[in-house]
Image (spheres, rainbow, N blue to C red):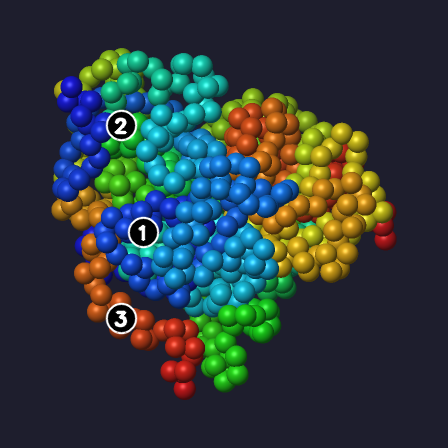
Amino acid sequence: MEQQNLKDTFPKGCIEKITGSCLVLPGDDIDTDRIIPARFLKCINFESLGEQVFADDRIEKNGSHPFDQTTNKDASILVVNENFGCGSSREHAPQALMRWGIRAIIGQSFAEIFFGNCLALGIPCMTTSASSIRAIQKEIHNQPNQVWKVDIANCLIKNISREWKVNIETGFQEMLLKGQWDTTAQLLSKKNELITTMNKLPYLNNFKSMS
Amino acid sequence: MLSGGATQIFVGLHLIHEVTSPQAFAALKELGMKVRCPDRTVATVDHIVPTTDQSRPFSDPLAEEMLLTLEKNCQNHNIKLYGLGSGNQGIVHVIAPELGLTQPGMTVVCGDSHTSTHGAFGAIAFGIGTSQVRDVLATQSLTMNKLKVRRIWIDGQLNQGVYAKDLILHIIKTLGVKGGVGYAYEFAGPAIEALSMEERMTICNMAIEGGARCGYINPDEITFDYLQGRIHSPVGSSWDKAIHWWRKLSSDLDAVYDDEIKFDASKISPTVTWGITPGQGISIEELLPYPESLEDKDKQIAEEAYKYMKLKPGSSIKDVQIDVCFIGSCTNGRLSDLEIAADIVKGNKVAKGVKAFVVPGSEKVANDAISKGLDNVFKDAGFQWREPGCSMCLAMNPDRLNGSQISASSSNRNFKGRQGSANGRTLLMSPAMVAAAAITGKVSDVRNLLTQQS
Ligand code: SF4
């Protein structure tokens, strides 16, 4: 029941830890076209994206794709390899993952725009070494339904018996922990500084201020 | 400085289009806010527009709804929309430079990863996600972390039949699709200085494909010449002052970079991708690599690519049969691209069984091309001449591959399914190489056609 709730409530406020089962999606360079094929971008809201995540890969795998396996159905932590989320800047990709139920992603590395898009939704993307990823994948493989915890304050991912170090830049970590990943509010608070900058930019006054 | 050590940066030019803006406008409405700087925000439609019949309403109701939503949002917030038939509609990264909106020293953002294109003007330009679009609409600023800078220095000059597209494909193939993560790429050196603005845009356009957040080229006389007299360029005494400011923006000669890499342009051959990432490219003379011979990190994706592309290691990319030829996109849909391709096509015919089409990057490109008679050159050869838009670059419109068709494409991405069919295959190459493929029906070295002509 708790898991079910998790799927419908999106991240809010301070994000300190994510608890749930893990889903392994192996492979490097998984791009956002695969996460959400372009034809699903034809929408004016994000609502139905959860069902369409990895649509083409799932059709190709005919039920055996990690996002279709029943053991993964309640997973909230996604475990990936290198350069996850490369390609198009579409925020539909993290939206689709979030609406499917993903609340944290652990991987070797992430594409930058994707990382930023996830952060803006309150979904931490944390990195760790290839060997840790392999070890984590193995543990999940051995026991798919076990409970994992991603601890953002201490930069750890752990199950009942072991833990691994994961990384996130302290700045981003702080934003999550303090609930300040909502960037709009932050940016609005610096109105005056922005006006100062604007007054200094020559192209905003048709270069009149230039001597 | 913001919480988390990020910097708040002002956005000088915010470009919006129909795909990534509707949710951002909806969020703005929820916050009860207005657009902070409507005069720094410019809209067009490109991704979903059909390229055959553009009369309204579109036959695809979803596409029509997206366009209506954009029109309504622009109207409500006083944002200039260069819509269909305005004479200035087109792919967002084609029209902003054309209109003189993109200028040196600006920060240019758009909810589209190929915003890096505008870096060709010495602007800092990058793609953003929809929540950032919301932030920029609301505050005309966004949060950003400092990037490292890698200077990519290109010595020598490109040989005949080798173009900016080959150069950037070569760079990405060498540095890899992840090579640029965390970096801005500064493209410099004699080969870059010799490029026209349109060619420079092709280079910066694909910086993102090399993993860099943005790419840029220092502004110079070629930049200023391009900008002079454009609709939004400064005029009169402002123009002189602008040039004075723009000149000062160039990197200092003794600038220190986080990393530097050198290439020699004269050693580069026409380059084609064979796989499912833009980094999987080879020169036309090479044979497809054996996965065993690759570095560990490239093996798995190479095997996946061979399976998907139905190609064999050790075989030649030359002579691979092509079904569809696409000339267009924000990488290579500008006038000079069409001119180069038309030169090759002229007096030839599209090979039997090949569907070939040209999609100008903007209404202005289309009009200029028509006034030079290029449309007829293409049509006489058997190409279709289409209306401007993104078209088969990403197939959010009716232009797409069917089944496992294979395309020669002047666009920028060859990801699985990118061109609208879940098993469609894409070979990226220069417009000249696409033209050569159209005529011969297979991947061909365009240099051979050029020698025949001369
Ligand atoms: S042409 Fe292609 S890459 Fe460029 S903006 Fe359109 S869809 Fe994106």
Tell which subunit mark 2 falls on.
A
Q: Decide: marks 2, 1 in contact (CB < 8 A)?
A: no
In space, the residues marked 3 and 2 are separated at their CA atoms by 40 Å
Residue B120 appears in the picture as rendered: no
Of labels 3 and 2, earlier in sequence is 2
Quarter residue B189 falls in:
bottom right
Q: Please state if A35 lies on the left or on the right of B55 as rendered.
A: left
The spot of residue B103 in percent (x, y) is 48, 67
Q: Please state if B181 lies on the left or on the right of A198 as rendered.
A: right
| Amino acid type of the residue that numbered disc 1 sits on in the rendered structure | Arg
Residue A84 appears in the picture as rendered: yes
The spot of residue B442 in percent (x, y) is 74, 33
Q: Which residue: 29% across, 71% down? A: A197
Q: Which residue: 27% across, 45% down? A: A120
As drawn, the residue found furthest toward the bottom would be A211
How many circles with numbers are drawn on the protein? 3
State the residue position of label 2: A101
State the residue position of label 3: A195
Are the residues under badges 3 and 2 in a single subunit? Answer: yes
In space, the residues marked 2 and 1 are separated at their CA atoms by 23 Å
Mark sitting on residue B134: 1
Q: Residues within 10 Å of mark 1 (few under 14, many from 20)?
A: many
Q: Decide: marks 3, 2 in contact (CB < 8 A)?
A: no
Quarter residue A199 falls in:
bottom left
Tell which subunit mark 1 falls on.
B
The spot of residue B452 in percent (x, y) is 85, 47
User: Label 3's element?
Assistant: helix
Q: Residues within 10 Å of mark 3 (few under 14, many from 20)?
A: few
As drawn, the residue found furthest toward the front would be B57
In space, the residues marked 3 and 1 are separated at their CA atoms by 19 Å
